[in-house]
Each structure stands twice: as C-alpha cells, then as structure tokens.
Image (cartoon, helix red, strand yellow):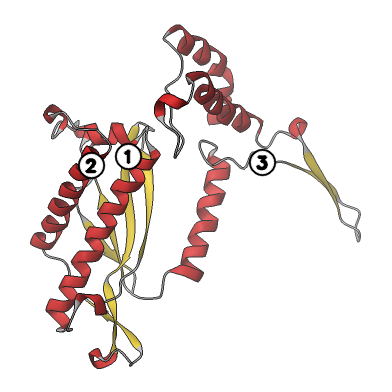
Amino acid sequence: MLHQTVAEHWPAFLERAEEHGGLPRFTPSGVPRRGLPRVVTQRVVVKEFEEYLGCGQLERGCLHLVCRDCGYSDLVAFSCKKRGFCPSCVGRRMADMAVHLEERVLPRVRIRHWICSLPWGLRALLGYDRKLCAEVVSAFMAEVDRSLRWRAKRELGIASVTRAYTGGVVAVQRTDSALRLNVHGHALVLDGVYVHQNDNPCAPLEFRELDTPTHADIADVASRTAARIEKILRAHGRSLDPEFGDDTPPELALDDPGESHPFGS
C-alpha cells in the first residue's frame, strides 16, 4: 500500500515541491550548511525515494536461484539496501542490529530505557544538522553515565566514581508515529554498574544493580543535560528563541523529559 501510494503521487509531489522552492536542504555530517548546493541535497532525497520505488522490483535486477537436486528455480529481486525510507530494508537492518545487540553487545543484566525528549525548537534544529544532533545526544548520555556513577558511590560505598563502570547504547529516532519530524533519543543503559569485588582494583569485576532512580535523580539528569546543550548551542553559534522553549504541541509530545523505564533482567 505504501509503495503504491508513493509511486502514484511521487511525480506530482516533486512538481509541487519545485513550485514552492524545492525540497528541504539537509546537511550531511561534517559538511558546512552553506557549502552544499541545494540541488545536491535535493538529489540525495530524490535518489532515496527512487531507490525505494525500485526495491524488490525484478526489472531492476534479480538473482536466479536453482536447486541442484530437484530443479526448482526462483527469481529473487535485489533490495535497495537504503537506510532512510524503505520500510523493508530499514526493518531488516533493525532486526539485524537487535540480534547483534542481544548476542554480542549488551550483557544479560537489568537494562533501563532512557528517553531524551527535547523542546520543539531544538528538534527542528537537530533534524537538519547531524553533527549538532550527535553532540546533543552525547551530552545526554554523559549525564546518564555521571548519574549512575554518583548513585553507585552513594549506594555501594565505593571509594571513587572512577571505579564504577557503566555501559549503554543509544539510537536517534527522527520522527513520530505519523512520520513528522520529531528528533529524540532512546537509550538502553545498564541499570547498575560494574565494580571491583570489595572495591579492590586488583579483584575481578562484578555487576551490581542500583536502586530505581528517584524523581530527583531524573530531574538532575534533565537539568544538567539542558545546561550542556546550552553550551553546545552557543559553541555552534545557535540559540533557541524563548518562545520555542515549552510550546511542544500536545500531539507531538513524547514522554516526560528524562523519563526512564526498566526492563529485562
């Protein structure tokens, strides 16, 4: 259904976009916004959609598979292997990544889901600047890491926060369920820390779960993340107009800023 809808309306959409000044200008990572002609960024977007329209179409290329034993044969169309829009290829990539995280990255300990929800004006900025987006997400993860280390020192009585080891992975989701621009972060973070047994640097590491973060703990992560983001914006010569601070439309609102959810054990 989606493929049919895009195929039917894509030419008309491009025509209307040109009438209104062309498609939005997206800035690839590491490239100055003014250093990339609009026509180049438009070409990237157009190619992404056109590759999707050709995904799984036999006339765009295929493999002819034949069973040597029974003689059965079949044609398997090539996929576009794009990661921007194609639901099939993106879904396959997501499934592969989930297996990779489950089997090779995340240890079998309790995990907490942290959500980084941002002011509406900042979401719009990050949607067109990958470098800025990466720095903001890194700031959020650094504050979650800091919170875990200090909570570990308080709860476990370790001598220094440097003796607590944390871990996690984060993914940036660019849209909401209606495919509207809505940049926010989802992080899977160990709900505890690795510490040396008996706080002895020479002893093996063991995982120690921490208590559920309090509202004060979460508020501290949110406020410190906000302070970091303000510095990042100033370093980039950016700022948020105060009117964008708390004007997130209700239909675009995510969970409360800094909200976290535990799962797994």
Using a 10 Å C-alpha cutoff, classify the residue at mark 2 as few (fewer than 14 neighbours), some (14 to 19) or many (20 or more): many
Residue 84 vs residue 35, the one in the foreground: 35
The residue labelled by disc 1 is 183
> What's the CA distance linking mark 2 and mark 1?
8 Å
Using a 10 Å C-alpha cutoff, classify the residue at mark 3 as few (fewer than 14 neighbours), some (14 to 19) or many (20 or more): some
Residue for point 36% across, 38% down = 177
Is 136 situated above or below 11? below
Q: Are marks 2 and 1 in contact (CB under 8 Å)?
A: yes
Where does the C terminus fall, quadrant-wise?
Answer: bottom left
The residue labelled by disc 3 is 79
Q: Is residue 123 visible?
A: yes
Is 260 situated above or below 51? below
Image-quadrant location for residue 251: top left
Using a 10 Å C-alpha cutoff, classify the residue at mark 1 as few (fewer than 14 neighbours), some (14 to 19) or many (20 or more): many
Which amino acid, by three-letter code, is at mark 2? Answer: Leu
Q: Is residue 188 left or right of residue 163?
A: right
Locate residue 198, reporting x and y percent: 24, 93
Which amino acid, by three-letter code, is at mark 3? Answer: Ser
Is 201 situated above or below 5? below
Instruction: Tell me the SS state at disc 2.
Output: loop
> What's the CA distance linking mark 3 and mark 1?
27 Å
Instruction: Tell me the SS state at disc 3.
Output: loop
Q: Are marks 3 and 1 in contact (CB under 8 Å)?
A: no
Q: Is residue 183 left or right of residue 210?
A: right
Q: Is residue 33 left or right of residue 148?
A: right
Which amino acid, by three-letter code, is at mark 1? Answer: Val
Q: Is residue 1 visible?
A: no
Residue for point 25% across, 33% down = 237
**Disc number for residue 118:** 2
